[in-house]
Structure formats: structure tokens, C-alpha cells
Amino acid sequence: MDHRDRENVLAIILAGGEGKRLFPLTSDRVKSAVPFGGAYRIIDFVLSNFVNSGFTKIKVLTQYKSHSLNTHLSRGWRLSPLLDQYIDPVPAQMRTGPHWFQGTADAVFQNMNLILDEMPDHVCIFGGDHIFKMNIRQMLDHHVEAGGSVTVAAIPVPLAEAREFGVIRTEDGKIRDFLEKPQDPEPTVPGGTTALASMGNYIFRTKDLIDVLREDSEISSSKHDFGHNILPRLASEGRAFVYDFSKNTIPGMEDLETGYWRDIGNIDAYWKANMDLVAVTPSFNLYNPYWTIRTYRPQVPPAKFVFADEKNKRVGVATDSIVCGGSIISGGQIDRSILSHGIRVNSYSHVSESVVFNGVDIGRYARLNRCIVEKDVRIPADLRVGFNPEEDQKFFFVSSGGIVVVTQEGIERWIRENRE
């Protein structure tokens, strides 16, 4: 690959999605700003992949409830302008008319000035709401060698899940067909159990991207979406290629992590991806020193575990768990759970298989099982959540898989009913 091709790259992160299927975690924040893994936000993973791969010209397109995302980026993701490095949040500007983004392609088209100002050789367009590690240089190498207009990263998924993605059919590395969210996806091979799904990560040759977006903007019947319109067209013209993500490697990667990618589009998928982190040998390893997941970290003291009163079963302990700074496990027990910053777990309480956001206080004798607890919630003493779905549904959102999302509003409803 030519040196200039390798370095003259602009990254555009699509981070404006509403994330309706992840409600209620997205009731006050955009999906890419949802906390993940205790210390991170979802967007940290794609940003870390670009920075670790050596690409540091990054625009983040925002739209829906972006305040917390913008705050996170401004506090934690400052690169060096002296070295022409930047991560710039770009709010919806309505540059092409008084309307919000009509689709993913329209989001880029409305911000065409970002591309024209920089005029890179290639534009990476990635989603801001997936959990994965990727050496993007390897995908760029593949893209340049293939010589097409676009390269799409792809990974096999079970047929039952494929209808949620763009499904790709290939021939000799070219994308023959691209079907966005087909109701009856075909397996990659006849009789197979998986289909090849788009990861929502694309690399375009800049001139071709500009041309196809301009042409698409003039088609009134178009959804102005990469999956529905742009990629099917380029595939039909023989100008789209596929990149096999399972071949991507990063320094320090274990075999178990090969091909790990999660689209955490709903509460159950979000909870499962968090639980992947707490295994003794995790399928997604946060502790690889050669591929750091970067983020903004608040200035908090170390986590603390107090009381070793085994006689009265008042022991502060955490097993198979992640506990972030500023948290105090004060005589409570944590098992297979993830605790973010500044959490207090009071005596005799028990938290299992749960994800707890910043600033939560868990009262004495409370028991939480398979829960996601929103930030700053005050869990009353003796409250039991995650053991009786019918009871939980009176106060909280309960997913189809039985995961309970505990909010302060739900707690207040519980308090009012119990006082009555």
C-alpha cells in the first residue's frame, strides 16, 4: 500500500442513533453514550480501535440526546492538534435543509463538507454502538488491494439473528448481493446455519463515496441509507468487496477473542455482553495491555472492601466481578456483576449477575439478581428485584429474557405502593 493511502484517512463515526430497542437505558442518552463494562461508554470501543490503529482524524456525527456523549468526548478524548489529530463531535446542522438525518447515508451527505475540507483518499464510516476490537489498518490494506469503491466488514451470525442485519452473499471476495434485514435470510452455504452479516463498518474510496451520495440524494424514493440503498447499488455494479473480520488480529489477542463482535441492540444483548467480561477467561478481554480500551475516568479513590465479620455474615466481598474506583463494598456480597464508579453496597445485601451504573446506593438486606441499575438510584433496604417477574413488572422494565432495568422512578413507585 502506498504510504499516502495508508495515512490520508478520515474516520466518520455514526453516533446519532436513538437506540429505541435499548430503552430505558436510552431514555436520557444516545445509545453510543450508554455505560458499558463499568468504566466505559459504548463509543469508547470504536474510538480506541481507530486510535490504536494509528488513525487520529475522527469526526463523530451526533443527533439524538447527545449531551452526555459530547461531555464524555470533551473530557476524555482530546488528541493533539499540534500533530493534526482530532476527535470532533459534529451535531446535526441541517446543512441541506430543515430536516434531521433521513438515514445513515443522509447523515454523511449532510456533512459532506467534512470530507471536502479534508479530502482524504479513503473514508472509514463506522458505527458508534458496537463492542469489538479491530486493527483497522488490516481492513484498509484489504480495501486498497481489492480496488473497489467500498469494503464492508462482515462476520457470520446465526440465521435466527441474521434478519436484524445486512446479509451479504459473496463471490470471490466481491459482494454479489446485499440485503438489508431480510425476513428470510439465506445461509452462507446451502443447508448452513449461519449467514454473513454486515458489521456496519465500511471503508470507501473518497471520490466514489462523494459521487454515490450526491446521486442518492436526488432519488426521492430512496431511504438514503447505506444498508438499504448505497451498498446494494454498489454490489450490483460489482464495486463492493467484503472483509472477513474473523481474520483480523491485534497484538496480545487470545484465540477465544477471534471474531468477537457484539451489536448490543437490546437489553438482553447488552446484559449478555457485559457478562462476557466477568468470566475467569473472558471472551472479550479488557486487560490486554497491547490494545488499551481508552476512556475518560473520573477522579475517584480506589475501590474499598470492608467488614470481615464472618460470624455474623457481614463480609464485604466480590467474586467473578468488576468493581470500579470510588466504590465501597461495605459488608455486602457481589457475584458475577459489574459495578461502575462511586457505588456503595451496604451490609447483608447481595448483588448477582447485575450491571450497576455510577453513584448507586444499595441498602441493607437488598437482593438484586440479573438487573441493570441506572445511575444514582437509591435501592431501599430489603428490596428484592429479579426473583419474581410479575412483581418486577409492576415497577420496572423487564426484558423478554427476564433482565430488570431498575430506575429511580421505578423505585419511587415501589416506595409509594409499599407505604400505602
Image: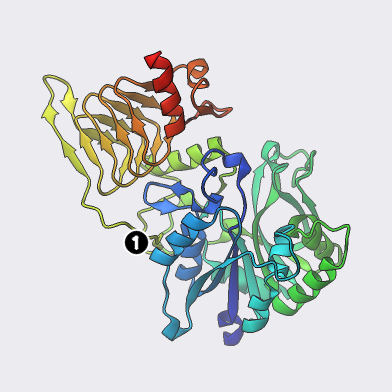
Task: Say if 60 sits above or below 144 in the image.
Answer: above
Image-based side of 227 in relation to 308, left or right: right
Label total for image: 1
Task: Say if 80 sits above or below 286 in the image.
Answer: below
Residue 133 visible in the shown view: no
- Rendered residue at 56%/53% (across/down): 65
**The image quarter in which residue 220 lies:** bottom right
| Position of the C terminus by quadrant | top left
**The image quarter in which residue 221 lies:** bottom right
Question: Quick one: 280 or 10, which is closer to the camera?
Answer: 10
Secondary element type, mark 1 = loop
Image location (x, y in percent) of residue 211: 80, 75
Residue topped by disc 1: 289
- Rendered residue at 30%/35% (across/down): 361
Task: Say if 270 sits above or below 110 in the image.
Answer: above
Amino acid bearing label 1? Pro
Image location (x, y in percent) of residue 8: 59, 82
Image location (x, y in percent) of residue 347: 21, 27
Image-based side of 393 in relation to 117, left or right: left
- Rendered residue at 54%/42% (across/down): 27
- Rendered residue at 86%/62% (across/down): 236
